[in-house]
Amino acid sequence: MSKGGRLAISLGLFLVVVGLVVWAVAVYLTPGTPGGEMNFTNTQSAGQPVNLTVETVGAIGFGPHPSWVSYLTKDPHTGQWVQDNTWKLPANTVVNMTIEQFDSGSPLRNQQWGQVEGTTGGSASLNGTTYTAFDSYSGAGVGHTFAVPALGIVVPLPGVAGNNICGAGPCLTSKWPHNTITFSFKTPGPGNYNWQCFVPCGLGYLYGNGGGMSAQNYMGGFLDVVR
């Protein structure tokens, strides 16, 4: 083979490697794109609040990454827990969120994420008690956060104490210790709004944004807000 031919092959292989590296970095550092979604636009009468229930688990227990942390969504039509975290919601509508938090916790890297922000009244409820902030150095720390950056929403989800932690989702409130967090917010106009969990659940990754943190339908999803 001529020198020019060898050079062309080497250049081609180099470009392939560069392309793979760019693709891997993009997948690693971004939360994914909208895919399938769960429809909450037909679960209530027009103008009435949407009731949306999710749970956080320390290990999903199935799929290609069974050990990854994850959110699961309760299907409003069947009552089953599914790994589908893109939610189709009506615009300018109150959403009543219930989060059943089954994971252990730890201190937050940034204590600002311990503040409740962007919710109705600037507060949330932990097992029936209202809170506007949570000290992640107290109790069992913070297990996860629910945040919609574009809407200024952040809600810390206090961790579960002790060693009796649900090992794989879906987790049942009748069987495993958990914290129940409730809050409300109002959807804006139509658009796709990314929601996600911030650290500590991405503690072992670059910028806390790897593994389940950067994977669609694990620790993040989208609000698909429609008219």
Image (tube, helix red, strand yellow):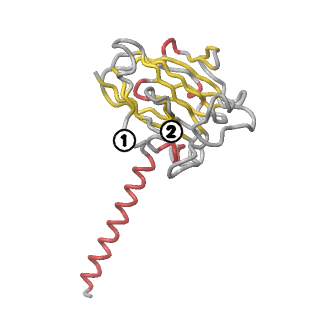
- The type of residue carrying mark 1 is Thr
In-image side of 122 versus 142 (left or right): left
> Would you identify the image quadrant in which residue 192 lies?
top left
For marks 1 and 2, give the CA distance: 13 Å
Q: Which residue is mark 1?
A: 33
Residue 114, compared with residue 211, is above or below; it is above
- Answer few, some or many: residues within 10 Å of disc 2's Cα (few below 14, many 20 plus, some between 14 and 19): many
Q: Which mark is residue 119?
A: none
Residue 43, compared with residue 56, is above or below; it is above
Q: Quadrant of the N terminus?
A: bottom left
Residue 100 in picture, x, y percent from top left: 59, 28
- The type of residue carrying mark 2 is Met
Q: Earlier in the sequence, mark 1 or mark 2?
A: 1
In the image, 44 versus 214, the foreground residue is 44
In the image, 70 versus 140, the foreground residue is 70
Residue 43 in picture, x, y percent from top left: 39, 21
